[in-house]
Image: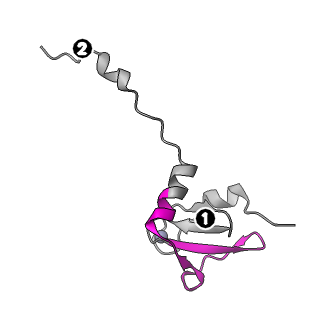
Amino acid sequence: MIASVDPHLLEILVCPLCKGQLLLRRAPQALVCPFDRLAFPVRDGIPVMLPEEADAVTAEEVEALRARQSPQPEPSPLRFMGDGGVS
Ligand SMILES: [Zn+2]
C-alpha cells in the first residue's frame, strides 16, 4: 500500500526556505518549490521539509507541474469584439 499526501496538508505546508506554496509531484512523490526548484521527498505519506533532504528539479519539471496543477483559463479572443470606447 502506498501512502499519499493529505491534500489538506499540502494546503498548509509551505517551502521552509521561501515560505512559498508547493506543488505536488508524483512518481516519486515529492513537494516541489517552484521558486527554489527543490523537491522535498515524501516518505510514507510524510513530507520531509528539510532543505538538505531535497533534490534539485529542472525548470522544465516545475513548469510541467504548474501546468498540471493550476490550469489557467484560456483568454477568449472574443473579448476584442467590444467597442472599447475608442473613437
Ligand atoms: Zn522555496
Dot label at residue 83: 2
Dot label at residue 49: none
Quarter holding the N terminus is bottom right
Residue 55, x across and y down, in percent: 56, 79
Q: Is residue 73 above or below residue 80?
A: below
- Total marks shown come to 2
The residue range painted magenta reads 38-63
Alpha carbon separation for disc pair 1 and 2? 46 Å
Q: Residue drawn 45% across and 34% down?
A: 74
Q: Amino acid at mark 1?
A: Leu
Quarter holding the C terminus is top left
Q: Which residue is mark 1?
A: 13
Residue 75, x across and y down, in percent: 40, 32
Give the structural element (helix, strand or loop) at label 2: loop
Q: Is residue 2 left or right of residue 14?
A: right
Q: Is residue 16 above or below residue 53?
A: above
Q: Is residue 87 above or below residue 54?
A: above
Q: Residue drawn 62% across and 63% down?
A: 25
Q: Residue drawn 55% across and 62% down?
A: 22
Give the structural element (helix, strand or loop) at label 1: loop
Decide whether residue 18 is among the magenta residues: no
Q: Is residue 69 left or right of residue 19?
A: right
